[in-house]
Image: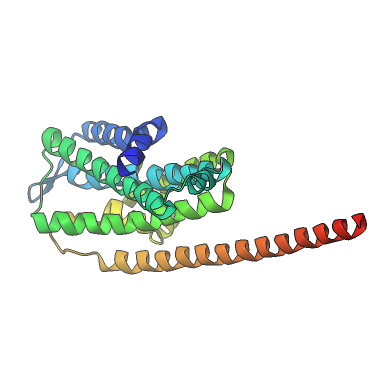
Amino acid sequence: MLWLSLKTQFRVPISVFFSLAFPILMLVLICISYKNFPLGNGYHFVDKYFLISIGIGLVPLALISMPMWIGESLEKEIYLRLKFLGVSLSRFLCCEVFSYFILSFISISLDLVIATIFFNLKLPPLLTIITFIIQIFYCLTVLLLIGVFIGTSIKKTKVIFPLGMLLLFFSYMICGVFIPFSELPSFIQNLGQLFPLKYVMNDFFSIWSTSHLFDVKFLLLNSVWLLLVLLSLYLFSIKKKFFNKNYNKGVNKNEEKISTHCD
């Protein structure tokens, strides 16, 4: 199931382009444009923009690919068909979600390889790299849950795709993809402080440069977002169950009335 899920991911052109090709393209273009100037202590511009290129790949994966997959599956009743065929939905869904983490890891690895080979990225100790990736995956977990909420609440792919693109460019704008974060207007900087992704794409340089292993402010903010998204999903599921329950009651009453009338 996991292999099939990964094959499905690589057959979606927009997913492959925005998650794998676009981050590398931006990394190469920006580093060449800025001449990869030195920052001191053996670090260069690539050591900072490498973080941004990682975020560039995570956003479309979580806010476009994930909700599009869920919306299309609900729209075409794929889950009902799989259940009818005896497929374990829990195993199927776990494999699908895990495939997104694998694709994210591939994206990060490609950024790492390209930045190291062509732009002399300075690699920290292995422990730092591990904690760095763990915190990125923690942020990705929240982003994927937001994608789940979008996919389950909207369901229509014609609406999900433009909404996902809007969220993508909004995230890029407030995180300093096209303009350095420090050069953004103050109100946009203040807005960016509320989003965990901003810390991944900017403040994680302190982790990469071995100043410390964890970004405490990011962890707290991301935990708040995690609780809010889980609460939203829970409330939405309760509302959906309540609506379905009342709808079924109404259908049963109508059937009783029709049966009585026929009698």
**As drawn, 194 above or below 110:** below
Q: Residue at x 54, y 47 (%)?
A: 80
Q: Position of residue 190 (x, y in %)?
A: 41, 60
| Left or right of 235, for residue 35 | left
Q: Position of residue 220 (x, y in %)?
A: 33, 69
User: Hey, which quadrant is residue 65 in on the image?
Assistant: top left
Q: Position of residue 97 (x, y in %)?
A: 37, 50
In front: 180, or 106? 106
Q: Residue at x 32, y 50 (%)?
A: 98
| Left or right of 8, for residue 53 | left
- Observer able to see residue 151: yes
**As drawn, 94 above or below 228:** above
| Left or right of 156, for residue 96 | left
In front: 107, or 84? 84
**As drawn, 195 above or below 158:** below
| Residue extending furthest toward the front | 263
**As drawn, 136 above or below 166:** below
User: Hey, which quadrant is residue 212 in on the image?
Assistant: bottom left
Q: Position of residue 134 (x, y in %)?
A: 23, 58
